[in-house]
Image (cartoon, rainbow, N blue to C red):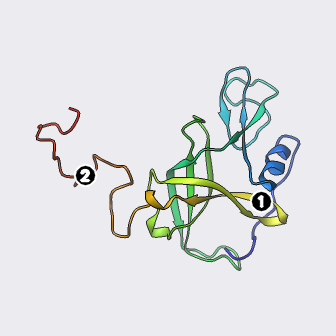
Amino acid sequence: MTAPVGIPPAVTEETEPFWTAAAQGRLLVEHCGACGAESFPPYGICRACRHRPVEFVEITERGRVYSFTVNHQRWLPGLEVPYAIVLVDFPGHPGVRVAGRLRGCAPEEVAIGAEVEVGFEPGPGGYAVPSFVAVSETVKAPGDTDAPGDTDAPGDADLSGAAGGAGS
């Protein structure tokens, strides 16, 4: 993407801490002090137990691609295609998934399970929007059909000698 395109976010009392932190390159998610649940995007109330208020905690760890799509449609002027949008899980923050554009690898190299680092890029209205940067050793090579770290995918050879495979 060469230019921030799209509709600026509607900043509310509930989302303002997120957007302020985003401008500083920090990713915040909501944390419920009553039940411990975490969620994103900000909502101002716990989605699990309905407790108010919630507090914000920062995600500083790498995430893993949970799902992705590669977009080939130029939806807005100035939008470079193709590009990948990823949905990212964070192991230390169960239940939190954040969507964003993936940078740092070609769209055809994106894979489920690939590690990503949190990043931000300029968005509409001058806001910083979450995006992710591929960790190079965890993206798949062109033509590779297995996900990174996948040790039991169809087509993998069973080298354990046991009928059920390793660990059976």
Identify the residue shown where x is 76% and y is 64%: 123
Would you call the spot at circle 2 few (<14 residues within 10 Å), some (14-19), or many (20 or more)?
Answer: few
Residue drawn at (83%, 44%) of the image: 17
Which quadrant of the structure image shows residue 93?
Answer: top right
Number of marks drawn: 2
Mark 2 = which residue?
A: 154
Q: Are marks 2 and 1 in contact (CB under 8 Å)?
A: no
Quadrant of res 129: bottom right
* Residue 100 vertical placement versus 42 (above, below): below
Q: Is residue 24 above or below residue 140?
A: above
Q: Secondary structure at mark 2?
A: loop
Mark 1 residue type: Ala
Q: Among all residues in the image, which is located at the extreme top?
A: 34
Q: Is residue 139 above or below residue 83?
A: above
- Residue 94 x/y as whole percent: 57, 34
Judge from the rendering whether residue 47 lies leftward or rightward of residue 155; answer left or right. right
Q: Where is the C terminus found, in terms of image quarters? A: top left
Residue under pointer 1? 128
Amino acid type shown at disc 2: Pro
The mark nearer the N terminus, 2 or 1, is 1
Callout 1 secondary element: strand
